[in-house]
């Protein structure tokens, strides 16, 4: 009886991991196309202490399979295609520091990088950027995140936020799900573009009154808790296009 339960549990975990890896593939295609970045990657914490899976946006230099690899917290490869990404400590250290986070994205969106160089955090400036309320924290050193100490420092800078800017390098977004981490990255770059254009026309920054007004309006609109939805409407929109092989207007839709 016990062996039967263990087999059923293992089969259920295997099915969940397959679903997660399918979502990694979808997220990588969404982000590569929407942000225009082939060097980024997206990762997820696997259930049952099975380690971490990361999908590079690009494919390996040889072969046509997706660059998707599983590894443990000591950065030992467990399975998959391709090598472990050089900046995998981003995932190991953030997942250690944030039990609430199960997925993360690291990518290099141009306007977010531009704002980071100007020491301008992405902030709550429009209805769909409420997740950045208070401004995104910024990691001040524009280096690659290659060793555990650097990964831990980035995790500390992230704190309890949903995203962190790495000055002159890129961004990291996190979430309870792949959906959340992916869509947060999209809205972070979109918000950075809105902020940059608005500043050219005299925008001086978000006021507490503006934030309060938007917060009250969102509370009326989103009466149902967001976690009741299996996937966000944003994810479903983009994922459907990926599944149908349909491209879209990059960057603003």
Image (cartoon, helix red, strand yellow):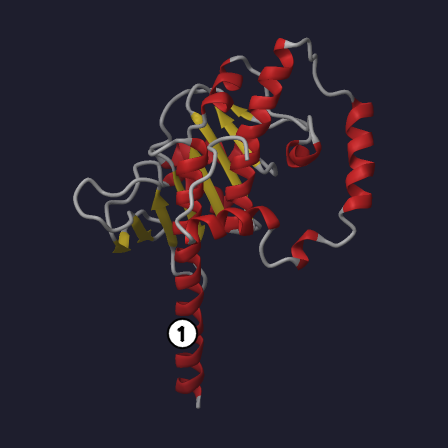
Which residue is tagged 1?
10
Query: What's the residue at 54%, 52% (across, down)?
Result: 236
Question: Where residue 161 appears, x then y in whole percent?
Answer: 60, 36
Q: Front-most of 149 and 132?
A: 132
Tell me: 8 left or right of 234. Answer: left
Question: Where residue 5 appears, x then y in whole percent?
Answer: 45, 83
Q: Above or below — where is 141 with respect to 26?
A: above
Tell me: 83 left or right of 38. Answer: left
Q: Front-most of 236 and 218?
A: 236
Query: What's the residue at 53%, 49% (across, down)?
Result: 179
Tell me: 135 left or right of 208. Answer: left
Q: Please identify the quarter of the rendering in which residue 17 is found.
A: bottom left
> Extreme left residue here?
62
Is residue 135 something one can see in this rendering? yes
Q: Please identify the quarter of the rendering in which residue 133 is found.
A: top right
Q: Secondary structure at mark 1?
A: helix
Q: Above or below — where is 208 with respect to 34?
A: above
Tally the numbered discs: 1
Tell me: 37 left or right of 194. Answer: left
Query: What's the residue at 55%, 35% (across, down)?
Result: 253
Is residue 92 something one can see in this rendering? no
Question: Where residue 203 appears, x then y in whole percent?
Answer: 69, 13
Other-residue count near label 1 (Cα within 10 Å), few / some / many at <14 / 14–19 / ≥20: few
Question: Where residue 61 appears, x then y in whole percent?
Answer: 19, 40
Query: What's the residue at 58%, 55% (across, down)?
Result: 231
């Amino acid at each position: 009886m016990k062996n039967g339960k263990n087999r059923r549990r293992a089969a259920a975990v295997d099915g969940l991991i397959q679903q997660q890896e399918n979502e990694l593939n979808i997220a990588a295609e969404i982000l590569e196309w929407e942000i225009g970045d082939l060097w980024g990657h997206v990762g997820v914490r696997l259930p049952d202490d099975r380690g971490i899976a990361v999908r590079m946006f690009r494919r390996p230099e040889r072969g046509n399979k997706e660059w998707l690899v599983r590894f443990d917290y000591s950065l030992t490869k467990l399975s998959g295609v391709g090598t472990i990404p050089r900046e995998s400590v981003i995932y190991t250290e953030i997942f250690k520091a944030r039990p609430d986070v199960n997925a993360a994205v690291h990518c290099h969106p141009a306007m977010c990088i531009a704002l980071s160089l100007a020491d301008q955090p992405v902030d709550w400036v429009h209805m769909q950027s409420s997740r950045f309320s208070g401004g995104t924290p910024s990691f001040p050193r524009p280096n690659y995140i290659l060793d555990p100490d650097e990964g831990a420092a980035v995790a500390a800078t992230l704190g309890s936020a949903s995203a962190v800017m790495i000055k002159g390098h890129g961004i990291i977004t996190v979430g309870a799900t792949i959906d959340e981490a992916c869509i947060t990255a999209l809205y972070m770059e979109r918000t950075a573009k809105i902020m940059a254009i608005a500043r050219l026309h005299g925008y001086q920054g978000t006021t507490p009154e503006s934030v309060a007004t938007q917060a009250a309006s969102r509370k009326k609109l989103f009466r149902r808790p967001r976690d009741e939805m299996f996937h966000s409407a944003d994810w479903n929109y983009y994922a459907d296009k990926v599944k149908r092989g349909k491209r879209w207007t990059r960057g603003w839709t």
